[in-house]
Image (cartoon, grey):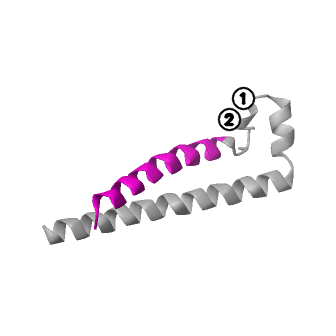
Amino acid sequence: MPIGFAYTLIALLIITSILLTLLILLHRGKGGGMSSMFGGGVTSSLAGSSVAEKNLDRYTLLVGIVWFACIVGLGFWLKVTVSSS
């Protein structure tokens, strides 16, 4: 497999890691979480709507799946590269 494949997966892994961290921090916890720190009442009232929470859950799940696929892809690439050497 070409090395460009690995570089693409690494770049995608870095981007999805940052996005996943931000999306998780935006979730509303039991006590308001980190999302209440940024904007106070405005953010907590927006996060309280069920549509916004469902969309945030969907985006977090989608980014998590892409992140996991990058990890598996890099492992597969490493296995093929090491076995061919």
The residue at the point 69 percent across, 60 percent down is 58
| 49 displayed left or right of 20 | right
Towards the viewer: 46 or 3: 3
- For the magenta stretch, what is the residue range? 1-25
Q: Residue 34 carries which label?
A: 2
Q: Which three-letter amino acid code belongs to the residue tagged 1?
A: Met
| 45 displayed left or right of 29 | right
The residue at the point 35 percent across, 53 percent down is 7
Secondary structure at badge 1 equals loop
Snapshot quadrant of residue 47: top right
CB-based contact (under 8 Å), mark 1 and mark 2: yes
Task: Provide the major secondary structure of the magenta segment.
Answer: helix
Q: Residue 18 carries which label?
A: none
The residue at the point 78 percent across, 28 percent down is 39
Quarter holding the N terminus? bottom left
Residue 73 image position (x, y, % from top left): 38, 65
Task: Based on the picture, tell me whether residue 70 belongs to the magenta stretch.
Answer: no
Q: Marks 1/2: CA distance?
A: 5 Å
Q: Which three-letter amino acid code belongs to the residue tagged 2?
A: Met
| 75 displayed left or right of 55 | left
Towards the viewer: 13 or 46: 13
Question: Which residue was labeled with disc 1?
Answer: 37
